[in-house]
Amino acid sequence: SNIVPWQLLCEWTGARIRVCPVNDEGEIEIDEFRRLFNNRTKIAAFVHVSNALGTINPVAKMIAIAEEFGAITVVDGAQAVPHMRVDVQELDCDFYTFSGHKLYGPTGIGVLYGKSGLLDALPPYKGGGDMIESVSFEGTTYAEAPARFEAGTPNIEGAIGLAAAIDYVESIGYDVIGRHENDLLRYATSRISEIPGIRIIGTAGEKAAVISFVMEDPIISALDAGLKLDQEGIAVRTGHHCCQPLMNRFHVPATIRASFGIYNTREEIDALEVALRKIQSEKSDPTPKQVSNVEWPERFAGSPKEAASLIAEDFLFFDNQQDKNQYLLDMGNVLPHGFDMLKLVTERVPGCMSEVYLIGRSDPANPGALQIMADANADIVRGLIALLQKIYSGQKAKDILAFDIEEFFKRIELEQFVTSQRRNGLAGMVKRIRSLALGIEKP
């Protein structure tokens, strides 16, 4: 959210983005930050607290540096406001923003603070009721800020809910919240650090109550770990956390993130430790045998539609999410391990939270048909690959292109057991398969 809007702005204006690096602990390199500025720098945008690592950035110092060069400062405080008291006048930032749901409030609402002089200079970006002073066919004059930015009926119930959430947090007190969350952070860091084979990503000296980590010995993907923790009744976030460049900086596709709030306890951290050790112990084959010459999968049924019907019948036997997930895992367990080989011969499928590699060829024994081969570094995704292979591999390209995969996904109620982020990766695989089929259908 603090990258894409600026990329859009650059497309419109021709501006350029300059990126400040972070060190191995996940801290801003403040000297490099200063060196990025010159007399053409217009805006400095940065987060107060990293949602992926928990690092608390030295925003007061960063704002002061930006002011030396006359740059406008925009601070993303979504992760800071729930954990610490923020005084925008003391920081002297030009703009500060945060979202409601991170502060235990409603979704779909947030706060944008801006200095009055800058707000008065900004034109409205929407037109509608209550943002105008007067209207005629000859022209319109706009209301003073902030009304000029609030066209139409506002999110009244959201604002009331957010105000109630702020009152709730302030009734507890930021000092109390800070002491409790810092204690949880220190305790969790100690407990997780003692588990062999787990590496914490982001070890800044100043952190909020967030721990991101990867499981490396045995190797267990973040997606698989998140699924297994969910089965133990433990909620974590897995993936790139909308911070793909940061994941690339640390050379990991994704992390497991445990976030602690005012409602968490040390006992819950103990449960997390026990569950992580259990997951490690259950990893029976930490280094699956890689096959250098994987056989192309044969056709599973007479058509994609027939294959989908057979698979859907299997899903009818399962009543809950956990059983369906296990069914996918079982399907993935029989998939040959060709990950290392595929990684050498093709590009990674975009949009996937794990690493997925997929190739295809025209079936030499069945002209006009497509065979596909794929693998991933996450067991649950391997299950999805096995499902797609059963539907598509060996089928005529024209039938692949005509098949309504979305209707099939609805039929098996995929959204109940596949997260939206994992669904994005599934869509990426389907898109590549259709592209391969199109190449056969229209050579």
Image (cartoon, rainbow, N blue to C red):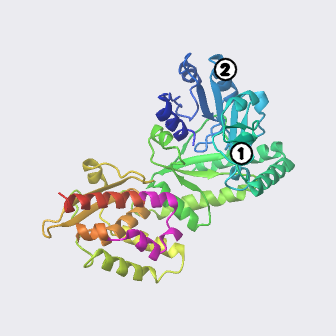
Seen in the picture, residue 203 relative to 262 is either above or below; the reply is above
Q: Please tell me whether the stretch drawn in magenta is mainly helix, strand or loop.
A: helix
Q: Nearer the viewer, residue 52 or 149?
A: 149
The type of residue carrying mark 1 is: Glu
Mark 1 crowd level (few <14, some 14–19, many ≥20, 10 Å Cα): many
Residue 414: say if magenta. Answer: yes
The quarter of the picture where the C terminus appears is bottom left
| Residue, far right | 171
Seen in the picture, residue 258 relative to 27 is either above or below; the reply is below
Mark 2 crowd level (few <14, some 14–19, many ≥20, 10 Å Cα): some
Disc number at residue 150? 1
The type of residue carrying mark 2 is: Glu
Residue 27 seen: yes
Q: What is the x, y in percent for residue 20?
A: 53, 28
Q: Nearer the viewer, residue 314 or 196?
A: 314
| Residue, far front | 138
Residue 57 seen: no
Q: Secondary structure at mark 1?
A: loop
Q: Is residue 16 left or right of residue 272?
A: left
Q: What is the x, y in percent for residue 160?
A: 80, 54
Residue at (33%, 71%) from the top-left corner? 403
Q: What is the x, y in percent for residue 17?
A: 50, 29
Residue at (25%, 62%) from the top-left corner? 437
Q: Is residue 148 left or right of residue 53?
A: right
Disc number at residue 67? 2
The quarter of the picture where the N terminus appears is top right
Q: Nearer the viewer, residue 224 or 34?
A: 34
Ranked by sequence position, the earlier of labels 1 and 2 is 2
In magenta, the rendered stretch is: 403-425
Seen in the picture, residue 164 relative to 392 is either above or below; the reply is above
State the count of labels. Answer: 2
